[in-house]
Amino acid sequence: MTNTQKSARSSTAAQKKFDGFTAEERAAMKEHAQELKASARRSPRTAKADGERDVLAKIAEMADADRVLAERLHEIVQSAAPDLAPKLWYGMPAYARAGKVVCFFQSAQKFKTRYATLGFSDQAHLDDGTMWPTAYALTKLTAATEAHIGELISTAAS
């Protein structure tokens, strides 16, 4: 193989190089590191109140459509599972049991997607057979949707 063939292959491989995480993903990881540092400094007595303050501040920063969904979702979680503690998780509002995230809201704006997401971690008690959903797309909250979310949150937190 000649040197020109080798360099042609090398430049092609360099052009296909994987860039790694997106800017949004890197920002979310930085936010998570800051959240961990902040929670380590907090008093266990004030952790829930501090977490709620952080979540409400993050919701207030969201674009209008996402903010409306997140505010209502926060109310639903508080009503359906008052024992879940609000906290930030990768810069998103989340709700935890014993420090472990059970469910979270991801705004459409966060990763530039076309819909917001209500997601559940493996800590959620939603197991149903051999397969079940762990995330739901949210575009609008109707009375029926809110009732379904309340049931999911209640089951997940049980």
Image (cartoon, rainbow, N blue to C red):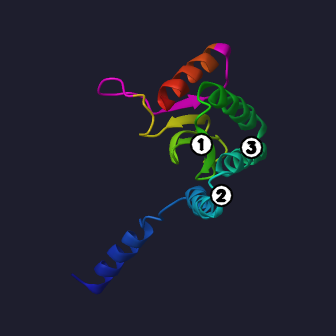
Most common SS among magenta residues: loop
CA gap between label 2 and label 1 equals 19 Å
Of tags 2 and 1, the one toward the viewer is 2
Residue extent of the magenta highlight: 127-143
Can you identify the residue that label 2 sits on? 43
Pick whichever of labels 2 and 1 is earlier in the sequence: 2
CA gap between label 3 and label 1 equals 11 Å
Q: Is residue 141 magenta?
A: yes
**Where does residue 119 sit, x and y in percent of width and height?**
52, 36
Q: Which mark is residue 94?
A: 1
Residue situated furthest top in the rendering: 144
Can you see residue 112?
A: no
Circles 2 and 1, Cβ within 8 Å, touching? The answer is: no
**Where does residue 123 sit, x and y in percent of width and height?**
44, 39
CA gap between label 3 and label 2 equals 19 Å
Q: Is residue 140 left or right of residue 123?
A: right
Disc 1 residue type (three-letter): Ala
Can you identify the residue that label 3 sits on? 56
**Where does residue 46 sit, x and y in percent of width and height?**
69, 51
Residue under the image location 35 percent in, 24 percent down: 128
Helix, strand, or loop for circle 1?
strand
**Where does residue 91 sit, x and y in percent of width and height?**
63, 52
Residue situated furthest front in the rendering: 45
Residue under the image location 32 percent in, 82 percent down: 4
Q: Is residue 63 magenta?
A: no
Position of 65 relative to 155 (above/below):
below
Residue neighbourhood size for the residue with mark 2, other residues' Cα within 10 Å, grouped as few (<14), some (14–19), many (≥20): few
Helix, strand, or loop for circle 3?
helix
Residue situated furthest bottom in the rendering: 3
